Amino acid sequence: LLEENILAEEDLLRALANVRHTVFVPSVRYFISKSVISTFDEDTLSRLKALPILKAPDGYVIALCESSPLSTVDELEVICNTKVHVIYTTKTEIERALFNLSGVNDSPKCQRSHLYRLYTSNQITWEQMLLGTVYQQIIGVSGRDMAEYMGLRSDDLDTDVPHVEVPA
């Protein structure tokens, strides 16, 4: 379908994420950090078409694509000796991010966002943070407004949460 230009890469990955009951993130570059990526060998990531984007409390959140081998999750769990949570993005996005690793900062660009601060303070999960951020970018609202759209009333949240790094 991709080779015949019947289906766009992004549409395929959205469908794959839906079938696998996970998140599709069109632009993972907003989330990646050198400290998370450096946990893995770049050649292995390139071969597996995999991109670590977040450190979760119980493992890593890794972006895969349609070209990632079926054994990718098992292989990465052995390498990092912890759980791997899968999200999807396009192969183009993964390759672009891996190619531009020298331009990746130690801290993700998203760390300034309200949703990321809620995540790092354990008030929302990584799934909620990713979904909220994707939809926030689509509809063009603030992180606080997005949290309220998600049913998280600001008076129920500690909105003056200091930024806390998720443990490595």
Image (tube, helix red, strand yellow):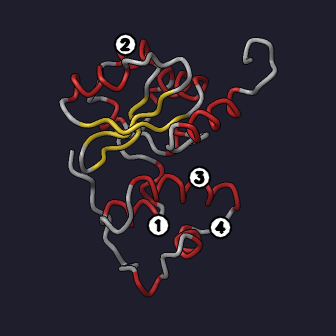
- The disc placed on residue 114 is 1
Which amino acid type is marked by label 1?
His
Looking at marks 3 and 4 on the same chain, the residue that comes earlier in the sequence is marked by 3
Q: What residue type is labelled 3?
A: Val
Of residues 39 and 22, the one drawn nearer to the viewer in this rendering? 22
Q: In which quarter of the image is the N terminus?
A: top right
- Tell me the tag on residue 141: 4
Secondary structure state at the residue bearing disc 2: helix
Mark 3 is surrounded, within 10 Å at the Cα level, by few (under 14), some (14 to 19) or many (20 or more) other residues, namely some
Q: In which quarter of the image is residue 145?
A: bottom right
Contact between labelled residues 4 and 3, with CB atoms less than 8 Å apart: no
Label whose residue precedes the other's in the sequence (4 or 1):
1
Q: Which amino acid, mark 4?
A: Val
Q: Mark 3 points at which residue?
A: 134
Q: Residue 133's spot in the image, x, y percent?
A: 55, 56
x, y percent for residue 4: 80, 13
Please say if 131 is above or below 88: below
- Measured as percent of width and height from the top left, residue 150 is found at 54, 70
State the SS at label 4. loop
- What is the C-alpha distance between the residues marked 4 and 1? 11 Å
